[in-house]
Image (cartoon, grey):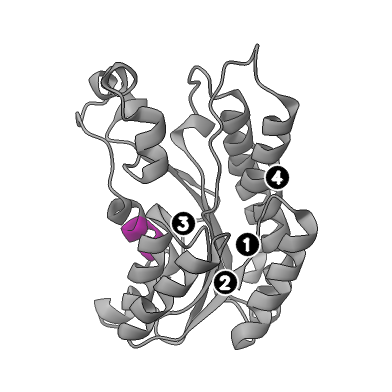
Amino acid sequence: MAWTERFGLAGKVALVTGATKGIGRKICEVLADAGADIVALGRDEADLTTLRPVIEGLGRRCALVQADLADAAATARAAAQALAAFGHIDILVNNAGVALIEPLLTASLADWDTTMAVNLRAPFQLAQAVAPGMIARKQGKIINISSQAGIIGLDDHGAYAASKGGLNMLTKVMMSEWARHNIQINAVCPTIILTPMGEKVWGEPAKGQPMLDKTPARRFGQPIEVADLVLFLSSSASDLINGDCILIDGGFSAV
């Protein structure tokens, strides 16, 4: 099999959450460029609409699903819409997330609950919805976009870190239960990625420079770098990789 086939996604359907901006939008573009049809799930309907011509311009089909993943009922409806769009899902990329950064002493229960709902409950709901079809077809890929904060402790990241640590362990349990059906489930754990959300939290030099000083690469990441790793994990080239939490952090966690 040629390398273009091993890394290609021709004939596959990918559901990507948080598809309208930053990492999610770039993942949609990269997977479509590799041959996948895209079901793009996002909260902002206007931004979703701008994504469709980009995907269709790459020669792939694009279905749009609008939903707020903080709402469990809306997430369940979105899962049903996504499955109905093209009849099945081959690749699920749980990318949507929120980062409500605040010290533990002043963190609100409302922000805690929102963080857990979007970052942890929604990936569980969506995986639970698409896994039966993957089991029936005896193949599938689930990629959970986690964070280095799910592995190392960062000040003011209590709810976020707990949600991503939970997502990492959910990834491992999914693998334990579903790997026997030829489904590969992995988590991608990036450092700070320079999306609008990343800029909002880390853009001030007083906040970002200490992180850069601890990062051997001396830089933060770009969305394309995460998207390319997701492409690899979505392809048959990565079939033996399962249950891993893969850091993409410029060496931050290695020192």
What is the magenta range? 227-231
Percent across and percent down for residue 66 are 61, 68
Tell which of 237 and 30 is nearer to you.
30
Q: Quadrant of the C terminus?
A: top left
Q: Residue at x 72, y 61 (%)?
A: 75
Element carrying mark 1: helix
Q: Quadrant of the N terminus?
A: bottom left
Majority SS type along the magenta span: helix
Q: Amino acid at mark 3?
A: Ile
Q: Which mark is residue 140?
A: 2
Image depth: mark 4 or mark 1 in front: 4
Query: The disc labelled 1 sits on which kind of residue?
Result: Ala
In-image side of 111 versus 92 (left or right): right
Task: Work out whether mark 3 precedes mark 4 in sequence or the reverse, and give the earlier one.
Answer: 4
Residue tagged 4: 117
Q: Mark 2: few, some, or many residues within 10 Å (few <14, many ≥20)?
A: many
The answer, for residue 192, to whether it is visible in the render is no
Residue 39 vs residue 192: left or right? right
Q: Nearer the viewer, residue 70 or 120?
A: 70
The CA distance from mark 2 to mark 1 is 10 Å
The residue wearing badge 1 is: 179
Q: Which residue is mark 3?
A: 241
